[in-house]
Image: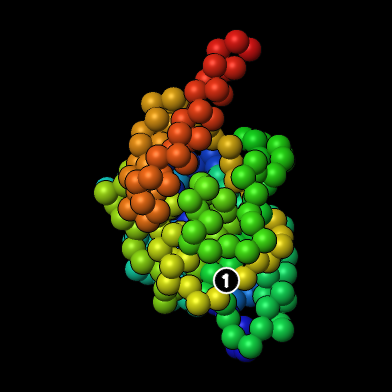
Amino acid sequence: MKPPVFSIITVTYNASQWLERTILSILSQSYPHIEYIVIDGNSTDGTVELIKQYASGISYWQSEPDKGLYDAMNKGLLRATGDYVWFINAGDTLYTADTLQEIVTSLKKKVSLPDVMYGDTMIVDAQGAPIGLRRLRPPKRLTWKSFRKGMLVNHQSFIAKKEIAPLYNTTYRLVADYDWCIQCLQRAQSVHNTFRVLSNFLEAGMSSVERKASLKERYKVMCHYYGPLSTFFMHGWFAVRFYTAKWFKGRV
């Protein structure tokens, strides 16, 4: 097979304190076939100057107002020309400098390139130090039905062929990535488990208001794909998890 090109897309807005380590993570990859795209939402904190500093290693970048995170991600998708698209946003990084090369090496026995590839995720703190693997672990075999249990694969460890990747549904403010992954898996004819940690995900935290809104949006997505009855029981599990965590937090 011809070595695949990975379009790695970083979306950022006023995150200059995190962006440099993300850029360096991509530029330090030992695998050479990378198209690196940076989409900035018209930042005012020095982000543009930082991007310009590394412009020689960036295939395309832009800085302009957008209508939110998923609108910006759509801009990146529309610019991507590689075989695969992979979103690594500001603050997140690839697991090691050899991550891409290891992924491609794992494909050597494949007759054709898989439509989706996935792996595990390491959670890191503000300094980039590992906290531990993500609590929801990727299943050995992933299908679109797997996501009825929640987002078992973090978006930063989910790689899709450009030709099957839809635009993000911007009517969702918080869970369009969940919807997007399901759509990709529905379209995929082949899914490859890399059995590797693929990304480091910055644990930024989410407010209780955002968490509730996220649960409501996820409920709508699950109803759409898995039906209201199944979703009712699954959503109940999400709600119990949320309120239990809130109860314990209030007593720490």
From this viewpoint, is residue 53 visible? no
Task: Give amino acid for label 1.
Answer: Val
Say which residue appears at 36% left-offset and 51% top-offset. 227
How many circles with numbers are drawn on the protein? Answer: 1
Q: Tell me residue 240's x, y (percent).
A: 51, 28
Asked whether, in this view, residue 155 is left or right of residue 167, the answer is: right
From this viewpoint, is residue 124 visible? yes
Q: Quadrant of the N terminus?
A: bottom right
Instruction: Classify 10 Å Cα crowding around label 1: few (below 14), some (14-19), many (20 and above).
Output: some
The residue labelled by disc 1 is: 191
Farthest top residue in view: 251
Q: Tell me residue 140's x, y (percent).
A: 67, 61
Q: Tell me residue 189's x, y (percent).
A: 50, 77
- Nearer to us in this view, 240 or 194: 240
Farthest front residue in view: 229
Q: Tell me residue 153's x, y (percent).
A: 57, 53
Say which residue appears at 48% left-offset and 73% top-offset. 188
Is 42 placed above or below 83 here? above
Describe the element under mark 1 as helix, strand or loop: strand
Is 116 placed above or below 63 here? below
- Nearer to us in this view, 80 or 231: 231
Is 196 placed above or below 192 here? above
Color theme of the render: rainbow
Say which residue appears at 46% left-offset and 30% top-offset. 239
Asked whether, in this view, residue 116 is left or right of residue 62, the answer is: right
Say which residue appears at 72% left-offset and 69% top-offset. 102
Q: In which quarter of the image is the C terminus?
A: top right
- Nearer to us in this view, 134 or 36: 134
